[in-house]
Image (spheres, rainbow, N blue to C red):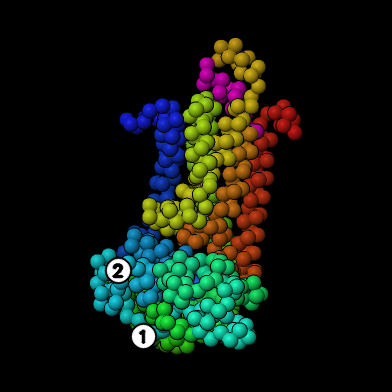
């Protein structure tokens, strides 16, 4: 592959940047055709409905209800459950990666369209329609944000309303990560109530309840329909300044569903006004506290309230394990294979051209410093959700160990051996192929092994954007406070990492010459 200088670039440093970026992009290009095929095959069905839900129990239940309603009309449904926060779902809806998902009016006006200062429902619908998005009428309950404390702690301090928190600046606040940055979240709450607290941390919503129970935090944000409010005996503080707006549950969906799946959409919209607040709280409690699968709870709701009989699908442990393993292997294999094809040439180039090498190593090093979750989110506008952004992110994370070890392995070859190969009259290509790469093979394989192990662990985060794999049961287990489910993903991921490491140890005995192995040992 040739690397071309951009017309306004001058010097070898610029060449290094251009060349290395070109090779990285080339590597990404190797995997994009496969990703395109994998992510668009299901789209060939004209009646397919792609349902999404956020990563908390209520949203997952509502997504399951929508899924079963669409299936009752014969539609093919792809349910992308417990994706990341609001922005992930909204962006996926705009790009068509998701056709419909449950949302809340307060979130739409205060987070998605925070700068538009929307005052009424008609204005909101008009703005949504401009983006080819339609909104259902309210489903029947208001799941507003609230602030809560343990009842005994609140009683002991005499705290009944949010403004009372001003008197206790040393209280420890633990808010969900999304609430920490939302337009209607902690920043605006702090300003509205002039709260002095400095000890404020962001954490997962479901972990916050455990933190409250263990007394490691004192105050958390709640969803008013959370079943845990009663279970953990919490006091919901009065919003005496009326900071939080109404969060009426609604459905957001793409306008083309009216033509693409009219029967399914008509049936789904039967949910309008049919889910009272108590019913939603009871469903949340069944799943979160009773351990009943969301599919079963959804089916019972439909039978009781809409006289629609569905057959909830419950996977066995073995079928889940096989499914998650195949998804995880798919993510790891494609990303690692592309990284190997690109990283070794980059390492060779870094060795041969010293100044270019500094640029290449600098770039792949910078990529490695980007937080994995941030990199996944960065990929969504370009590649949507699912396996595509996860694979590209994993590919980028796999570059540094292989590039660096290839470079180091070649640099560490004794000068005498290089001179001997040159004295034999071998041309540069032959010297690289017959002498230098075999001498550096142990180091190169060590880099590939490191990338593979890191790749297996990082791939669990792909579940946050619908890529599946072992991260799926881990996320579900955290959400439901279910240790066996967490282990269902964590243990196979650890075993797979060990197997990968063992495989490359075995490969080393095949590829690396015995003399080099003995020398290394």
Residue beneath the point at 27% across and 65% down = 131
Q: Nearer the viewer, residue 183 or 58?
A: 183
State the image coordinates of residue 368 (x, y, percent, origin top left).
53, 45
Magenta region includes residue 343: no
Asked whether residue 122 appears in the rendered view, the answer is yes
Residue beneath the point at 61% across and 84% down = 157
State the image coordinates of residue 430 (x, y, percent, origin top left).
54, 20
Q: Which residue is mark 2?
A: 116
- What residue span does the magenta drawing correspond to? 427-442
Asked whether residue 296 appears in the rendered view, the answer is no
Q: Residues within 10 Å of mark 1 (few under 14, many from 20)?
A: some
State the image coordinates of residue 27 (x, y, percent, origin top left).
45, 40
| Real-space CA distance between mark 2 and mark 1, rounded to the nearest whole angstrom | 27 Å
Indicate which disc residue 112 carries: none
Q: Is residue 246 left or right of residue 119?
A: right
Q: Which residue is mark 1?
A: 273
Magenta region includes residue 431: yes
Tell me the quarter of the image containing the C terminus.
top right
Mark 1 residue element: loop
Q: Nearer the viewer, residue 387 or 366?
A: 366
């Amino acid at each position: 592959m040739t690397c071309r200088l951009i017309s306004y670039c001058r010097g070898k440093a610029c060449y290094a940047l251009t060349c290395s970026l070109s090779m990285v992009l080339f590597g990404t290009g190797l995997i994009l055709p496969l990703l395109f095929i994998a992510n668009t095959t299901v789209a060939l069905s004209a009646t397919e409905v792609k349902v999404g839900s956020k990563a908390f129990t209520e949203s997952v239940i509502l997504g399951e209800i929508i899924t079963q309603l669409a299936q009752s009309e014969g539609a093919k449904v792809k349910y992308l459950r417990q994706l990341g926060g609001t922005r992930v779902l909204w962006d996926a809806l705009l790009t068509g990666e998701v056709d419909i998902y449950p949302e809340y009016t307060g979130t739409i006006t205060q987070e998605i369209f925070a700068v538009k200062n929307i005052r009424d429902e008609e204005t909101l619908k008009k703005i949504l329609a401009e983006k080819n998005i339609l909104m259902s009428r309210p489903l029947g309950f208001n799941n507003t944000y609230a602030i809560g404390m343990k009842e005994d702690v609140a009683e002991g301090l005499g705290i009944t309303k949010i403004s009372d928190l001003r008197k206790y600046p040393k209280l420890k606040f633990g808010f969900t990560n999304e609430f920490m940055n939302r337009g209607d979240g902690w920043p605006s709450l702090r300003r509205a109530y002039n709260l002095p607290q400095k000890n404020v941390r962001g954490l997962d919503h479901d972990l916050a309840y455990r933190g409250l129970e263990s007394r490691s935090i004192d105050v958390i944000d709640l969803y008013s329909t959370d079943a845990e409010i009663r279970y953990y005996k919490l006091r919901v503080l009065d919003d005496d300044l009326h900071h939080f707006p109404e969060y009426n549950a609604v459905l957001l969906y793409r306008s083309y569903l009216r033509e693409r799946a009219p029967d399914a959409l008509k049936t789904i919209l039967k949910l309008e006004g049919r889910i009272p607040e108590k019913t939603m709280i009871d469903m949340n409690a069944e799943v979160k506290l009773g351990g009943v699968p969301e599919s079963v709870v959804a089916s019972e709701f439909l039978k009781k309230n809409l006289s629609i009989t569905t057959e909830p699908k419950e996977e066995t442990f073995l079928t889940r394990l096989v499914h998650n393993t195949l998804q995880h292997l798919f993510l790891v294999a494609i990303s690692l294979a592309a990284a190997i094809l690109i990283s070794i040439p980059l390492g060779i180039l870094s060795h041969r051209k010293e100044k270019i090498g500094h640029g290449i190593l600098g770039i792949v090093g910078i990529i490695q410093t980007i937080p994995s979750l941030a990199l996944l989110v960065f990929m969504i506008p370009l590649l949507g959700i699912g396996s595509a952004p996860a694979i590209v992110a994993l590919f980028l994370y796999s570059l540094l160990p292989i590039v660096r070890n290839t470079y180091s392995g070649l640099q560490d070859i004794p000068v005498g051996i290089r001179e001997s190969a040159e004295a034999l009259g071998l041309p540069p290509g032959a010297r690289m192929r017959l002498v230098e790469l075999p001498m550096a093979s142990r180091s190169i394989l060590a880099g590939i092994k490191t990338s593979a192990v890191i790749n297996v662990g990082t791939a669990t985060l792909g579940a946050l954007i619908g890529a599946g794999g072992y991260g799926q049961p881990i996320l579900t287990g955290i959400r439901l406070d279910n240790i066996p489910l967490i282990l269902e993903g964590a243990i196979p991921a650890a075993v797979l990492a060990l197997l990968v490491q063992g495989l490359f140890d075995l490969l080393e005995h095949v590829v690396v010459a015995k003399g080099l192995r003995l020398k290394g040992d």
